[in-house]
Amino acid sequence: MKTAFPKWVVAATLASCSVLVVLCGLAAQMFAKERSIHRVQMQRKILVEQRSELLLHQVSRARGDDSSAKLDSDIVRRWEGVLAQVKHPYNKAQASVLGEELSDDSTDSSTDLEGMAVGGQRTKVVWSQLPVGLSRFALNNRAFFDSVYELLTLPSEDAWLSPTLASRGVYRVRELVLWDVANSLVSKDQERLTKSLEAYLRLSLLSGHGGVVNFGDLIGLLHLGLDEGLMDAKTVRPVLDRIAETALVNLNVVDPFGGDQETRMAFYYAGFSKQLDRVWMFPSLKESMFEEYCFRNNFGAKTVVDNDLYFVTALKFYTLAVRVALLEAIQEKHGELDMPGDVLSRLRLPSDLEGLLATKLNGNYLPSSLFSYEQKSPGVGELKFTVPRDISSGAFPIRTTYEVQAASDPK
């Protein structure tokens, strides 16, 4: 007597085989996708190598002089030392701590800086609450900063050097120098402020971090410079104009890649990938991280209207531009102002920045719509900003209210 083979066993077997076929198909597709992404990533590295060799060959031919070659070789070697030193874990850890915001119960009002009040409230950023910690950090890095400033004064018109520095993370040097700018303001060191500020602006170009969007922190410190009397409208105006020249998109500032988007992104990828040399991951995951890296650093960005970071930094730039224009008007008219015309006639904003503000404000933007000035006496008054986004947070916050008076020459 034969026993019938259970139908459920047959069904289960067929289902298992079907699932296995589907899984194999999906695995094959995933493998093909990962291989394709990996191929693109390898092509980027090859392109960087080829481009670097070509540029180096062109520069060598153009020099034709062993002494200049040795000079540039020394500059490259010194930059290598700077880039190696800036990656020290101490710098990253200390900068992170200095930029933290303290909780209410940890704030000691006795350590506040007078110039760092925000909207009537004292800022709760560690470096403003504990300026001794900032001073110690800047002092520990004094020799490093000095070496960077000296390097930036040396001739470096090298078609190979700029993209190499950008791809190797020179932006970290720029971020570190910002703390020397902050300490110069806190310690009221005018000479150091001039030197560190110029270095920061030059490093912004070398690192490809031009553009208003990359100067939000510096704008906060320029406001503080006006508060502390170390700067006036005459000294801030050139810095403001240099930032404005870069407009919103940093790729138009300095393009060592001759407008070649593919080469530019390849160099950016080389710098990003070098940070993950010892970490294995799926190519697709690495590509996703690279896309986020590009977004956060504004690499290749062309559309800025939907980026809230651009909007916030545009508002920050606007506050400084208005404040400088107001101070210029007070000085030129000896405090007797015709508002808002005297400010608007001196207000200079990049056209794309104004376009962004108009778009974000649904077409209701007018240059005079976000600020008001109450004159208490000739040359003395209160400047207030009414902005639709928070600009008072972060490591270098900006106030929405400023006491204004005719200033003497900066100290």
Image (tube, rainbow, N blue to C red):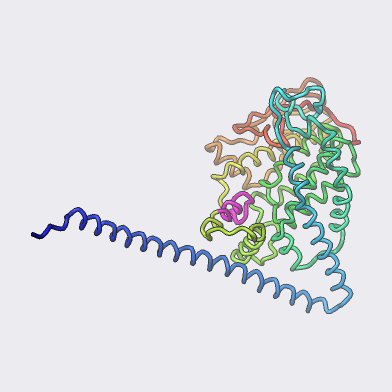
| Residue at 37% from the left image edge and 63% from the top image edge | 24
Side of 346 where 299 appears, left or right: left
Would you say the magenta stretch is mainly helix, strand or loop?
helix
Is residue 297 rendered magenta in the image? yes
Residue sitting at the far top: 376
Q: Residue 80, position in %: x, y?
A: 79, 61
154 or 183, which lies in front? 183
Residue sitting at the far left: 1
Q: Is 339 placed above or below 78 here?
A: above
Q: Is 163 placed above or below 132 here?
A: below
* Magenta segment boundaries in residue numbering: 289-301
191 or 290, which lies in front? 290
Q: Residue 198, position in %: x, y?
A: 83, 50
Determine the image quadrant of residue 75. bottom right
Q: Which part of the image, by quadrant, shows the C terminus?
A: top right
Q: Residue 72, position in %: x, y?
A: 84, 68
Determine the image quadrant of residue 370. top right
